């Protein structure tokens, strides 16, 4: 090993990171663990939200169905009254 | 007990590994990136990765090899991401300016600066050779490159450094 290589060894010697380096890494590993522990809860929350949305969707469709049914019944009632009225007029004229 | 993680199969302890290897990991990143703050960030990421992969580490020596490999790879990735130094051919590496040399006349500082300007592969080879005192075969394994390429990077980088230093000495006369 010549003088340049000796100098390179000195120039590239190991240096220490900041004194709180290990503590900062530990803090971040706890953060990792915390996030990992939260995963099942997050999935459950997402599933609950999806179920509520699906339920709301079904309820809304049922409400729309009922509305359509009521409008149909009203239309039948009006049509029936009209038919009765026309029948009464026809009877009067044929008398 | 907070923060202590021990792999059940091997008994390797995360805190102990971090204590043993933090200087090595930090220095690899620091010499590669020449920025203390960024090097600490890279070193933290390397140890977080070790924490997640502790169960795959088989022994203390495997941990050392794994940490060197991941540290170099992360430093290369960070260097590319930041693109602070455009990649140049080895022969085109610039010398530090005369102004800098007057402010910083120490040879070791000059060498660190010159190494920081090398393209990524020769830079990684030089750092692993002279910081970690690894032989070309070990460096080749870490960097996944042929031993002949490692030797070539070493020879060319040393020749280049000699030339740059000689040119500087001539300029100073």
Image: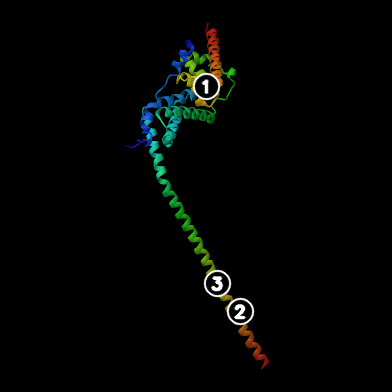
Tag 1 subunit: B
Position of residue A75 relative to residue B140, above or below, is below
Q: Is label 1 on the same chain as label 3?
A: no
Which image quadrant for residue B147? top right
Residue at 56% x, 21% y: name it: B149
**In this figure, which residue is indicated by the disc labeled 2?**
A79
Residue at 36% x, 30% y: name it: B16
Residue at 59% x, 17% y: name it: B91
**Which element carries disc 3, helix, strand or loop?**
helix
Report how far apart the C-alphas of labels 1 and 3 lie in the structure: 78 Å
Is residue A17 at least partly visible in the picture? no
**In this figure, which residue is indicated by the disc labeled 3?**
A69
**Which callout, 3 or 2, points at the residue further toward the start of the chain?**
3
Q: Position of residue B114 (x, y in %)?
A: 52, 18
Report how far apart the C-alphas of labels 3 and 2 lie in the structure: 15 Å
Single out the residue that lies furthest toward the right. A94
Single out the residue that lies furthest toward the top. B173
Residue at 56% x, 72% y: name it: A71
**In this figure, which residue is indicated by the disc labeled 1?**
B123
Position of residue A51 relative to residue B149, above or below, is below
Q: Position of residue A73 (x, y in %)?
A: 56, 75
Q: Position of residue B96 (x, y in %)?
A: 53, 16
Q: Position of residue A85 (x, y in %)?
A: 62, 85
Determine which of the numbered discs, if any, sits on residue B47 in the image: none
Say whether marks 3 and 2 touch (CB < 8 Å): no
Position of residue B67 relative to residue B134, above or below, is below
């Amino acid at each position: 090993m010549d003088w340049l290589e000796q100098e390179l060894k000195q120039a590239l010697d190991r240096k220490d990171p900041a004194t709180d380096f290990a503590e900062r890494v530990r803090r971040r590993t706890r953060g990792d663990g915390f996030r990992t522990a939260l995963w099942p809860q997050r999935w459950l929350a997402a599933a609950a939200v999806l179920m509520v949305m699906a339920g709301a969707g079904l309820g809304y469709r049922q409400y729309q169905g009922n509305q359509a049914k009521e409008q149909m019944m009203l239309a039948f009632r009006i049509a029936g009254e009209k038919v009765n009225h026309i029948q009464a007029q026809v009877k009067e004229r044929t008398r | 007990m907070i923060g202590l993680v021990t792999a059940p199969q091997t008994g390797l302890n995360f805190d102990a590994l971090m204590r043993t290897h933090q200087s090595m990991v930090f220095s690899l990143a620091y010499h590669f990136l020449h920025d203390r703050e960024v090097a600490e960030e890279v070193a933290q990421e390397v140890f977080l990765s070790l924490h997640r992969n502790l169960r795959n580490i088989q022994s203390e020596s495997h941990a050392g090899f794994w940490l060197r490999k991941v540290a170099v790879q992360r430093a290369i990735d960070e260097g590319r991401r930041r693109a602070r130094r455009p990649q140049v051919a080895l022969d085109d590496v610039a010398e530090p300016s005369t102004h800098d040399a007057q402010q910083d006349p120490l040879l070791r500082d000059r060498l660190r600066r010159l190494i920081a300007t090398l393209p990524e592969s020769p830079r990684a080879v030089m750092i692993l050779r002279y910081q970690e005192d690894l032989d070309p075969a070990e460096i080749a394994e870490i960097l996944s490159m042929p031993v002949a390429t490692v030797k070539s990077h070493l020879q060319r980088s040393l020749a280049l450094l000699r030339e740059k230093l000689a040119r500087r000495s001539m300029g100073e006369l």
